[in-house]
């Protein structure tokens, strides 16, 4: 149809996907992303922000949607908010390279909440996750690099994915899907200013986007209209927030039976900002080569987004350490570790580690910059006190589709995250729940993990 709004084409695609059915491979990918998301949410329970979020959720009116670690059930909007925020705290949730967003932290909480209040099946739930990832990632791929300087894509683009997932589970027709996307987009927000002082707003971004997507879909179900050209309109999302947007990318390759975007999502083995992971992997490799040789200097070559978010030579808090490229590289070189235990108060005060952190210098390398965001590469060079030099480079940090975590590694990560959150005893029943989701009708989350 000529001049069909982008949202209308997305709505048509979702309707067609429902008619054709989501492929089994994509449902399997959704299951692994769900387990990864659930582990991150459980780990978030052990944190100070997590305690504050739970207190907020417990004070809200009761409803029919589960809050992980909470006292009873709450409204779909509240559950999506708390669960989304919880899963974005420890920096181990999934991430998509091309869109530079964490789809699981926004899409899955929205889908879980609506699936529960509407008694949908496990297969419907997994299908909604696939649909939400598709929409969020496609919009994220289109916003361009300049958007990311000010705006957190997980929030601004993720809200569209949350609305799409909720719309799928509410069985909305194409017109109402367009309304849901329109009112999701008018709520799109999430500024990076919090990162200047390590405030808790990043968790709020994921939770609010999940909740706002649910709200937009529930309103659309009731006939509450939304703008049909929220993405490309004169005063729409792209013009307002993305100076170098490429709207055509939203629909690129959408016709027919495209390879669904969920297959390209990366899982994180390290408990820090994903922009640090390539350098961490390089440092871990170099550690095996330099043994105990004294280090004189460390040079990291990377792309601009890494330094925009993670150029923090001497972090003062555990959260700042997760966004410190220098600390992450030093920790990997010195301790061989960038897991959950590597970012505690003791680690950031450790004199030896702080000394090595001060020796790490980072810069943008034009050749590497040109490969981002299709790749998130890094090169690390270590100059030894004896005059020798060793270096390593990677285009794909561990967890990328080109270097994926195995099923055993995903489950091992889940076990570690659950134990960190104080729910180690629940690992077996929760693993069993995830494995049985395709057969569940209706879906029910175990209320007391």
Image: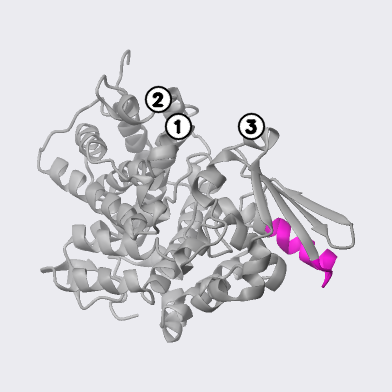
Q: Residue at x 20, y 37 (%)?
A: 183
- Whether 292 is among the magenta residues is yes
Cα gap from disc 3 to disc 2, whole angstroms:
19 Å
Question: Which stretch appears magenta?
Answer: 281-294
Q: Residue at x 33, y 61 (%)?
A: 85
Identify the disc placed on residue 243: 2
Cα gap from disc 2 to disc 1, whole angstroms:
6 Å
Q: Which residue is drawn at 56% across and 46% down?
A: 306
Labels 2 and 1 touching (C-beta < 8 A): yes
Residue extending farthest bottom = 425
Q: Where is residue 33 in the image (x, y as percent from the top left)?
A: 47, 59
Identify the disc placed on residue 370: 3
Which quadrant, please, contains the C terminus? bottom left
Instruction: From the viewer's perspective, tell me whether residue 182 is left or right of residue 135.
Output: left
Q: Position of residue 145 (x, y in %)?
A: 48, 33
Q: Mark 1 points at which residue?
A: 146
The earlier-in-sequence mark between 2 and 1 is 1
* Image position of 11 with respect to 83: above or below: above
Secondary structure beneath label 2: loop
């Amino acid at each position: 149809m000529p001049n069909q709004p982008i949202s209308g084409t997305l709505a048509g695609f979702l309707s067609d996907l429902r008619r054709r059915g989501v492929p089994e491979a994509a449902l399997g990918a959704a299951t692994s992303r769900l387990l990864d998301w659930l582990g991150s949410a459980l780990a978030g329970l052990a944190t100070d922000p997590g305690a504050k979020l739970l207190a907020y959720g417990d004070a809200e009116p009761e409803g029919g949607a589960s809050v992980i670690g909470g006292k009873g059930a709450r409204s779909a909007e509240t559950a999506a908010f708390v669960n989304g925020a919880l899963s974005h705290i420890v920096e181990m949730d999934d991430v998509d390279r091309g869109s530079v967003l964490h789809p699981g932290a926004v899409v899955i909480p929205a889908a879980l909440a609506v699936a529960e209040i509407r008694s949908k099946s496990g297969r419907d739930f997994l299908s909604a996750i696939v649909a939400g990832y598709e929409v969020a990632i496609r919009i994220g791929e289109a916003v361009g690099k300049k958007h990311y300087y000010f705006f957190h894509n997980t929030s601004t683009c993720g809200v569209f994915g949350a609305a799409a997932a909720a719309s799928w589970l509410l069985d909305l027709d194409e017109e109402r899907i367009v309304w849901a996307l329109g009112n999701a987009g008018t709520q799109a927000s999430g500024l990076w200013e919090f990162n200047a002082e390590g405030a808790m707003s990043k968790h709020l971004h994921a939770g609010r986007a999940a909740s706002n997507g649910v709200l937009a879909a529930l309103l659309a179900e009731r006939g509450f209209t939304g703008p049909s050209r929220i993405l490309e309109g004169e005063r729409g999302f792209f013009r307002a927030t993305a100076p170098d947007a490429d709207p055509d990318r939203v629909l690129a390759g959408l016709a027919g039976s495209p390879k669904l975007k969920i297959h390209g999502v990366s899982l994180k083995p390290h408990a820090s900002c994903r922009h640090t992971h390539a350098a961490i992997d390089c440092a871990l490799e170099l550690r095996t080569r330099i043994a105990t040789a004294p280090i004189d200097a460390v040079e990291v070559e990377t792309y601009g987004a890494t330094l925009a978010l993670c150029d923090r030579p001497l972090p003062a808090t555990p959260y700042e350490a997760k966004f410190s490229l220098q600390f992450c590289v030093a920790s990997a070189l010195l301790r061989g570790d960038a897991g959950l235990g590597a970012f505690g108060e003791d680690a950031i005060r450790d004199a030896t580690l702080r000394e090595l952190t001060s020796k790490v210098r980072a810069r943008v390398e034009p050749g590497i910059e040109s490969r981002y965001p299709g790749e998130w590469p890094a090169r690390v060079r270590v100059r030894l006190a004896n005059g020798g030099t060793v270096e390593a480079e990677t285009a794909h940090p561990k967890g990328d589709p080109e270097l994926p975590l195995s099923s055993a590694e995903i489950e091992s990560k889940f076990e570690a995250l659950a134990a960190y959150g104080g729910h180690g005893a629940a690992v077996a029943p929760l693993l069993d729940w995830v494995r049985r989701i395709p057969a569940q009708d209706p879906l029910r989350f175990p209320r007391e993990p």
